[in-house]
Image: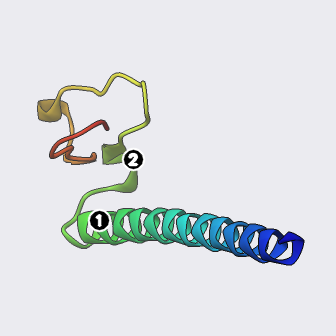
Amino acid sequence: MLALLRTTTLRALRAERDQARAERDQARAEAASAADFARRAEGTAEAEGAARDGWTADEPGAALPPAAELIWRVQPLHLGGTP
């Protein structure tokens, strides 16, 4: 009985560890993807002639200047759920 309990506990701990690892890896992949997207957007803006000081990026909680005052603006587009 004790051996069965140990085996079950070890399996549960391994499953939790594997789930935590998968969630951590997913979060890292999402962060890398967002950073890569921002770099590509910046490169595109510059390739189309936007001066690096002529556009802005969204900073969480910061008020953005009106779009009419900017040549380029990179900002997230929330499609649903919680931003």
Judge the density around disc 2: few (<14), some (14-19), many (≥20) Cα neighbours within 10 Å. few
The residue located at (65%, 65%) in the rendering is 16
- Distance between the Cα atoms at labels 2 and 1? 14 Å
The spot of residue 5 in percent (x, y) is: 79, 68
The percent position of residue 6, horizontal first and vertical second, equals 84, 72
- The amino acid type found where label 2 is placed reads Asp
Q: Say what secondary structure mark 1 lies in.
A: helix
Q: Which residue is mark 2?
A: 53
Q: Nearer the viewer, residue 82 or 45?
A: 82
Residue that carries the numbered disc 1 in the rendered image: 41
- Label 2 sits on a secondary structure element that is helix
Where residue 11 sits, quadrant-wise, is bottom right
Give whichever of discs 2 and 1 has the lower sequence position: 1
Q: In this image, 71 relative to 21: left or right?
A: left
Direction from residue 17 to residue 2 in the image, left or right: right
On screen, 1 above or below 63?
below
Residue at the limit of the structure toward the left, as seen here: 68
Horizontally, residue 51 falls left or right of residue 1, namely left
